[in-house]
Amino acid sequence: MRWIFRLIGLIVILVVVAVAAIFLVPAERIANLAARQFEASTGRALTISGSVSPTIWPNIGARIEGVTLANVEGSTAGPMLVAEFGGLGC
């Protein structure tokens, strides 16, 4: 019976550590890396002007605010996309 309680305790500790690790991830650095990779792939600038925070519910991912996607060079229409609030999940 003790082994069952120890096993349950170990599982609870592992879940708490995993959730804490998600919130220790440098979300701003990962968002900047993603923006640079997006720009290298598409040739369009992706600017993140708002906050970036990791999320675990309902999906593991990041909540990103203030995203602007530039239009093609030479366009006078302004940005292709402006999002004040959004989410990115896996």
Image: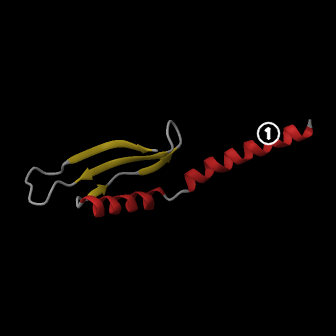
Query: Looking at the figure, which quarter contains the N terminus?
Result: top right
Residue 67 lies, with reference to residue 39, above or below; the image says above
> What residue appears at the point 47 percent right and 46 percent down from the top-left corner?
61
> What residue appears at the point 89 percent right and 41 percent down from the top-left corner?
3
Name of the residue lying farthest toward the right:
1
Q: Secondary structure at mark 1?
A: helix
Residue 33 or 51: which is nearer the viewer?
A: 33
Name of the residue lying farthest toward the front:
41
Q: Would residue 19 be found to the left or right of residue 90 on screen?
A: right
Expressed as whole percent of the image width and height from the top left, the position of residue 82 reads: 24, 46
Residue 74 lies, with reference to residue 85, above or below; the image says below
Residue 68 or 1: which is nearer the viewer?
A: 1
> What residue appears at the point 17 percent right and 54 percent down from the top-left corner?
71
Q: Which residue is mark 1?
A: 8
Res 12 → quadrant: top right
> What residue appears at the point 38 percent right and 58 percent down from the top-left corner?
34
